[in-house]
Amino acid sequence: MKTLEESIDALMAGYEEKIPVRHTEYVEEWASPIYGEILDEDTVEWTPCRQAEPLKFAELESALELIFHDSIKTLFGRWYAGDLALAYQGHPINLLQVQSAEDGERLLANITGHILMKRRLKQPETVFIGLGVENDDLLLSIDNQSGVVGLEWVGKEQHEVLADSLTEWLEQCEPQISENSD
């Protein structure tokens, strides 16, 4: 079985091969290393780029008094990329990615809000890593304790386990053309 790093790298390479021209939302304030040709004020071509320094979770872990599952840190700390349109067992899912250091800070703020909501609702702590395309209230998440990948509705507990690990889940995904990939 591949390591998580190998699975992420293989997915990124497969994504580039299957979808040679990729588009994502352009955020002018971000000096993102993934940005290529700017197509209009909202859209830019992108190419994945390894993070020189992985996204740092230590301050947030200290503030929240928890340790994030290694798979979460690896997923968001390995590549800068646009969100990845994937098919999992025929279902479209957008796997969230970090576009730049600034986007990483925004992601950490969103994760903070999600963890605090989970605590308030007295639910197991999860971290969202993707969204269902058919319904953006359907989150793809990782259980922070076990590393299990599952589905949950916003404000609810994971209701379906998809894989015991992120590595296992990624091995079942295929890059897919989406409206952001034309």
Image (cartoon, grey):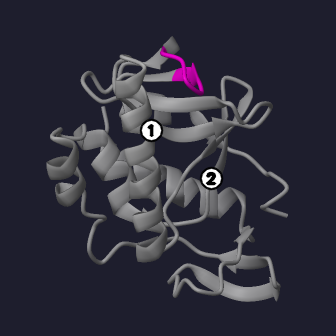
**56 lies left or right of 101:** left
Say which residue label 2 marks.
84
Mark 2 neighbour class, 10 Å CA radius: few under 14, some 14 to 19, many 20 or more: many
Q: Residue at x 55, y 31 (%)?
A: 140
Which quadrant of the rendered structure holds the C terminus?
bottom right
Disc number placed over residue 10 in the picture, else none: none
Q: Quadrant of the N terminus?
A: top left
Give the distance between the C-alpha atoms of the residues marked 1 and 2, in whole angstroms.
21 Å
Magenta residues, start to end: 151-157
User: As rendered, which of 126 and 114 lies closer to the eye?
Assistant: 114
69 vs 20, nearest the viewer:
69
Look at the picture and state if 51 lies above or below 157: below
Q: Is residue 94 visible?
A: yes
Q: Secondary structure at mark 2?
A: strand
On the image, the x and y values in percent for residue 10 come to: 46, 52
Q: Secondary structure at mark 1?
A: helix
Identify the residue at horizontal 72%, vertical 36% (top origin): 136
On the image, the x and y values in percent for residue 165 come to: 35, 27
- Which of the marked residues, 1 or 2, is nearer the chain's N terminus? 2
Seen at 40% across and 30% down, the residue is 142
Three-letter amino acid code of the residue under disc 2: Leu
- Please report the residue visible at 73 percent of the width from the left and 89 percent of the height from the top: 37
Q: Nearer the viewer, residue 38 or 6?
A: 38
Above or below, 83 against 89 in this view is below
Residue 15 percent coordinates (x, y): 61, 56
Q: Is residue 150 magenta?
A: no
* Residue tagged 1: 114
Against 7, is 172 above or below?
above
